[in-house]
Structures are given as structure tokens and as C-alpha cells.
Image (cartoon, rainbow, N blue to C red):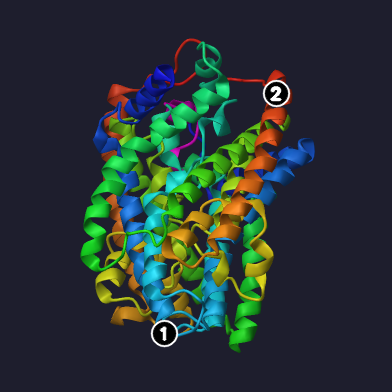
Amino acid sequence: MADRITFKRIIKLYAISAKMDLAWLLRDTKYALAGIGADLVSNLSIVSGVFLISVRFGGIGGMSADEVLFMMSYSTVITGIFIMFGAGNNIHISRIIGRGQLEHLFIQPLPLHVQLATCGFAPFTGGSNFIVGAILMVIAVNRLGLQPSYGWMLALIAYQLTTMAVIVARAYLVSSMAFYAPVAAEEISGTAIDGTWFMSTFPLSGMPSFIQIPLVTILPEGMMAWFPSLCLLGKPPLGLGAYYPMLFALVISFVASYIFRKGLNYYVTKGSNRYVPYGFRR
Amino acid sequence: MTKYLKTAHLSALEKTNGGIIYLLPDIIIKVCTLIPLVFLWRVVMSSGAQVGITLEQMLSYTVISSLLADMLVVKTPASGWLSEEVLLQLYGRPLPVLGQLVAITVGGWLPMLLLFSLPMVLFIPLIDINLVPASSYFGISLLLCISLGFAVDFLFACLSIKLRNMSWLIDRVRMAIVALFSGTVIPISLLPHGMAEAMKYQPFASLGGAPLMIFVGVANIRETIALQIAWNLILWPLALITFRKSQEGMVSYGG
């Protein structure tokens, strides 16, 4: 009998994940600290490169170095949220599907979407990028002379949620291939998420529209930091309006949901058998 | 030698076992990263700042970096040898382990060279980007870069043996450090605040950035190649000694 899902129950599930994360940090501190360091170095090396270039050239495509810093801080906060809520391959979902591990979730007395939403929460070992990103954002906001109001803060949260929705929806959309080709598509979410992370830090300002438009539609890397950052700076680009990211997130979420459900129906009828008797995956 | 060639051949075939179509996402990502990156540099360089490298050179740098990415920053299967069944392959064959790793890695480059780099070499000159090296020393520098890349990779692999359960983390940190410090994405000479001069002498600068700077003709060839040779002479013995000491400590625990 599945548990009744209430807001309180969801918070409790997040608390369970957080407790396990804290237990890992305390039990295996050396490994956990190495993980925190790895996440930080990995992200900062990506964003610092673009920022250093903007400093050297006095800005990029009409964006000042401080505006680029704001964009990089937005990207770092997103990376932080991604790591904090996606530590259990629940966003890299093709790994779970491709490895035949979806059955592990089927036997739990909780709906699949609730498990996937809560199982990857790691605030203690995964929160470093979020904190660094928030600090960078405060610095960038100060340097830009912005006076953040409550409305601006709400808009920031709304854009961050929207960006996360786009990341998750795209990951689930491409990961649906793993239902049909588990071996070949096991790492497809890695390609879609990690493979494009560097591209998502590109300030697209000043580029021709035949580059900009595809990057905010077909391959939405411009939606990861560039578009929402400019919206928050009061300069929504391309004449698409400040609400375009929300509309885009809505559309891609519906499409992803439809395709993923179709794949899931296929999976529950066909199943998956990935493991050889001595433990390795095929 | 035939055995190594056969190993490389098997490695190349392994990449396409599921069909060439399964390499398509990686190829699409590479193309979709390269094209905006070319335009990003066009926008950046149009500011007119004097940085010792022209727009044309920068575009060649970017494109060659993308086309030869696997060679400029070498990554062997040793990165995951404790968890990805690589150990069984390496120690189950009558060939030296490091030699096999080199053959497997080189063979693994071939599908992407044929399916991504070769078509792009035919296409790129159409958009006025020069793909002819400014100096014939580029080839020598590239070989030294690949050789040093293997030594660096083996050292990181030994570190993953030493730290047992951290191969994924080591790989993540290593790729991040190499991406920034090797100059494969952003030339070291473009870094601000005197960082360029300071970073020129560290070992990662002798990886991808060195042949790329020679390719576009902005490097001091003698100094660059001398540094590459020096780092090879330092890191290869270190890698071999460390590997000899490390391999007894390997512990594999499944996939």
C-alpha cells in the first residue's frame, strides 16, 4: 500500500535523503570532502575561463565583465542546485533506466515521481557550488550597483526554477531513448547535461541570430544562464520577452512527460537484463 | 607491433559495436559546441584589444583544438580501470599493460577522427578558417603533447589506485584542471593579470596549448618544444616508477 503523499511527507523524504548525506559526510569525511572539492573545481574551472576572457577583453558582445560575472554566478548557482537535488542519478535518469535499476524504485511503496524528486537531495556534500554561486552573485550584484527588491528576488527564484525545469525536462526527454536501447543510451543524459555544460556558459550577446535562436529553442543552452541573466538585468534579449523561459519550460516539460511515459510503458512490458552473473554490466 | 595494431583495431571497432548512429549524440554536441565557440571568439576579438593573436589565428586555434581534442588531452581507459572491467582485459592478455592502454586509447580516437574531424576538415575551409599549420614543428610538438598526455594520465591513474574509491572524483578534478591549465579551450597567453607568464612553465601548458600555439604561429617554437621535452623527461620516469609501485595495490570491485 503506497503512502499518502502530502507536503509533510515530501519534506520528510527530503529529510531522509539529507540525513543519509550527512551520515556519508561524517562516516567517510575524506571521500566526501574530496567530492565537494571536485564539484567546486570542476565548475569554477568552466566559469572562470569565460570570466577571465571577459576581463581581458573588457566584456563580451556588449555585456560588461560584471554582467558576465553575474551570468557566471547564475550558472554556478544552477550547478549548485543541480548537484544538490540530483545526487542520486535522478536527473541523469538514463543511467537508472539503462542499467535496469528502475525496478529498484518499483518495489518501494512510493510513487515513482516522488522517489525521483526526493532521492537525490544532498545538501551537505552537494551544496558547495550553491554557496559559492550565491556569494559570486552578491559580488556581481554589488559591482553592477543593482538594488534587489523583493520582486527581483522572487524573479530570481522563478528563473532558477525555470532553468532547472528545462534541464530536468531535457534530460528526461533524451533519456527516454534508454527505454528502447539501454546499453547504447545509458549515458545519453550525461551527453545532454554534462556535454553541453560548457556551452551553457557562453554569453550569446553579439552573436548572429542564426546562432542565438537555435540556442534558445532546439538546443536550449542559452536558457541555462544567458537569457535569464539578461532578463534579471532588465534586458531580455531577442525581443522574446521576459516570460519566454517560463513558456519554453512549460512546452518542453509537456513533451518530455509524454515521451517519457510512452517509454516507461514500453519498459514495463519488455523489462531489462543488464547484469552478467559475475556482477559486471553488459 | 601487429598485436598492438590489432588491439587498437579492436578498440576502434568497440566504439562502433552498437552502430555508428550511437556516436551521433557526441558528434552533434561537438559540432554544436564548436560553431557557437567560433562565433563567440569572433565577438570577443571584435573588441579590438591587442592580445598578441589575431582573429584568424584564434579561429584556427579553436577549430584545431576541437578536431584533435582527444589527442591534445589524452584520456586512457586507466581512469576507470578499477570499476569498468578494464582490469580483466588488461591483465588477461599477454601484452604489457601500459602498451595495451596506449593501443586501446589510440584505437578509440579513430571513429571520432573519421566521423567528426575528417568531415569538419573538409567543411571548415569553406568558412574561411585556415587549417594549414604555420610551422612544420607542429607535428613534433603534437607527438610530444600526446606522449606527455599519456604520462600525465598514468600518474592520475596511479593516484586513483592509491586513493581506491575516488577514481571518478580524480577524473573530474583532473579534467577540470587540464581544461583550464592546458590552454586547449582558452589560450594561456590570453589570461589576464600576468597569469599567462606564470602558467607557461607548468606541465599542463605543454599539453594541448603548446602544439596549438605552434600551429597558429604565435609560439616561441624553440622554448615551447624544449619545455615539452623537459616535462616528458621528468614525468615519464615518474609515471613508470609510480605505476610499478602502484599496480600491486589495485583493488577492483565490480561495475
User: Badge 2 sits on which subunit?
Assistant: B
Q: Secondary structure at mark 2?
A: helix
- The quarter of the picture where residue B236 lies is top right
Can residue A164 be seen here? The reply is yes
Whole-percent x and y of residue A217?
28, 64
User: Type of residue at label 2?
Assistant: Arg
Q: Is residue A50 inside the magenta stretch?
A: no
- Report whether B36 appears left or right of B80: left
Question: Of the residues shown, which amino acid type is indicated by label 1?
Answer: Lys
Helix, strand or loop at mark 1: loop
Question: Residue A19 shows which numbered tag?
Answer: none
- Circle nearer the viewer, 1 or 2: 2
In the image, residue B31 above or below residue B87: below
Q: Which residue is mark 1?
A: A235
User: Which of the 4 image quarters holds residue A243?
Assistant: bottom left
Q: In the rendered structure, the residue with mark 1 lies on which chain?
A: A
User: Which quarter shows the C terminus of chain A?
Assistant: top left
User: Which sits in the foreground, A60 or B55?
Assistant: B55
Residue B69 in the image, given as x and y percentages of width and height? 43, 49
Give residue B153's position: percent from left, percent from top.
Answer: 59, 38
- A102 in the magenta segment: yes
- Separation of marks 1 and 2 at Cα, in angstroms: 59 Å
Where does the magenta region start and end? A100-113
Q: Residues within 10 Å of mark 1 (few under 14, many from 20)?
A: some
Residue closest to the eye, B74 or A162: B74
**Quarter residue B202 falls in:** bottom right
- Look at mark 2 in the image and give the residue it sits on: B244
Residue at 73% across, 30% down: B162
B17 lies above or below A18: above
Q: Is residue B98 above or below residue A29?
A: above
**Disc 1 and disc 2 in contact, CB within 8 angstroms:** no
Q: Is residue B119 left or right of residue B98?
A: left
